[in-house]
Image (tube, grey):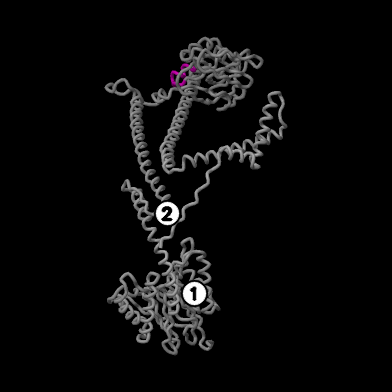
Amino acid sequence: MVRPVLPATPALPAPPLKARLRHSLTGTWRGRILLGALAVWLLDALLGLVGLGAPAPLSVLAHLVLGIAALWGLWRGLRWVSARFLWRIRTKLLLSYLFVALVPVVLLSLFLSIGAVLFMGLVASHMVTEDIDREAEILRANARSALAGLPASDEAAAAVLPERLAPAGARHPEVSWTLLRKGRVVAASGDAPRALPAWWVGPGFAGLVRGAPGGETSKGDVVRGVWGREETALIVDVPADERFFAELERRTGARPFTPGTGSTTGTAGEPDTSPPESGIEIVIRDEGQTATTSMASSSGLAFVAFPARTDWETGETRVFGGRPLTFQYQPLDLVRRLSPGLLPREAGPRTLPDLLLFALGIVGLVFLVMYGVALMLGLMLARSITRGVHELSLGTQRLRQGDFDHTIRIRSRDQLGDLAESFNLMSSGIRDLMREQAEKERLEEELRIAREIQMSLLPGGTLSTLPGMRVAALCIPATEVGGDYYDVLPLSDTRMGVLVADVSGKGTSAALYMAELKGLVLSLSRIYDSPARLLVEANRILAESMDSRTFVTMTYAIVDIAERRMRFARAGHNPLIHLEARTGKTRVLTPPGLGLGLDPGDAFERILEEEEVPLDPGDFFLFFTDGLSEAMNEGAELFGEGRLRRILEESEGLTSEQLRARIVEEVERFVGDAAPHDDLTMVVLKVVEEESAP
């Protein structure tokens, strides 16, 4: 019978926006607080027009409330936009595709651009700093060569020194120098220092010297080279002015922002604030001095260099002690200076960097076209996906309304097409499933009765036993009926058979095979005195009648209390765990064997082996199925034979019933709330002193 689907209760129409807004502001305490804060803010604004204001605590509280309300409104607005425009999977998928496709490209391009600019700036800064240091080294070399062979007479030395410094003058027309002997000035030209500082130890110095205040104007930085020999020293200076930086630009391609000529004043003066005619003007204030640097407008990138500056009075050299040297450079020109020169004549007038940049531009254009094509293809694929998802959503709504005859149009033979076909099959099968529900309930009731019958086939609460032997057993099916089976068979006054078996699979078929196995073992146990022979005969009979997909694992043992021994064989079943009382250690008994019903021929008999173990007082023997060792918790972890062996090794002083209860308790604690996945069966044997048996 098909259960009717009740139609959903129609939703009431939402009140108008104006009514909802009025209720939110006047009908709730949050709305009243917001109105109060808004009134305080308006009052404070009106009082501010006449130079007054609301009390400070009240004004702060009102602003805080309004800020919180603004954040809350922004959050609600974002939620509304998300619900309004992002409800459809199509919109979300297209937006996510655009974010995935465009945002990483933009961010990566920006990152690479910033990295390239910084790298080229650092290279240009290094070139500028190295050029200044090289010029200082050249000045020191000029000073050293000028002192070589200098006449001992002061007059003669002063006469020949200008000629010897002619190379420095040719390179830097504004060069100045001072010749010192025994601390006195022999000859001088320009603004070079007239004495060596106290920290001077010789023989040479080369570097950029920081300018110091002096006279009406402050002296700028100078590139200085000094060389001293015996008691004679020569100081050679070149001012770091526009002429020097013009030569630096010619050598490196970097155009520094040079200090202006009319904008430097002392601490008491006022700087010239007249703007430059064109370009960039930078005003730097350092230690009470004001310096203006300017540069004509031109294309290029700006960067800074930090050449090492030495304080001539103290000898202290600092990289970041003075003003940074700001300069402008052309990236393409920098690449050309760092690259090889012209190409061969047949390649034309282009340089190698020009050719490389042109090739890079072509590659970039090709990549851009390919990226645009890929983007369009991706958008088309995304739209085809979202269209299928939209139709699936409409079909789900029809299904919720009870329309099981609705089908989805299959537009493509892809995964979405398979999903639409599966949806159609699902909707057409729901009606059959609902009919089958009643049949299932009837079958469950029949399975409950079958469970009761199956449990009655197992030994009752009192197991047959022998003097000197204690037996405890347990069987818990995972479903209504199971395929595990155990039994204790009395064979004589001093012998009994013990068996544990597990039929592959679970449910009704396994239970039927279990019932067949019980009758078979009861018959064969009266015929065969050997566990191996019994299993061989059982395999021959079961192989003829059992389904090829089904098999049975079984362990059968014969306990002989008179001979104090146990003979057993294992047909592919779980191993037997033996606790030796004299050592307190467990061992796993695993004689070879094949499952019943797997081989109807001679292979089963050839593989099967029978073993024998002695029976000593205090020994435990645990027969079990894989449902015990493979009990699984919620983390998919198995209980394992190791835990079983540990429990047996800690069982000193326990009876067989107590050990069984201890094992069940440990398994239940380990499994927790996880559902059982297999039948759980075990038989516990304990050997006791014969006189202690009742």
Residue at (61% x, 24% y) in the render? 314
Q: How many marks?
A: 2
What amino acid is labelled 2 in the image? Gly
Who is closer to the viewer here, 603 or 420?
Answer: 420
Residue 204 can be seen in this image:
no
Disc 1: CA contacts within 10 A as few (<14), some (14-19) or many (>=20): some
Give x and y (percent) for residue 116: 44, 30
Does the magenta segment cover residue 652?
no
Q: CA distance from mark 1 to mark 2?
A: 65 Å
Q: Which residues are magenta?
A: 244-254
Q: Secondary structure at mark 1?
A: strand
Residue corresponding to mark 1: 585
First-in-chain label (1 vs 2): 2
Give x and y (percent) for residue 481: 42, 72
Who is closer to the viewer here, 326 or 241?
Answer: 326
Which quadrant is home to the N terminus? bottom left
Give x and y (percent) for residue 584: 51, 76
Residue 354 can be seen in this image:
yes
Say if 262 sits above or below 527 in the image. Answer: above
Q: Secondary structure at mark 2?
A: loop
Disc 2: CA contacts within 10 A as few (<14), some (14-19) or many (>=20): some
Residue corresponding to mark 2: 402
Tell me the quarter of the picture where residue 55 sits. Answer: top right
Magenta part, dominant SS = helix
Label ID, residue 262: none
Does the magenta segment cover residue 252?
yes
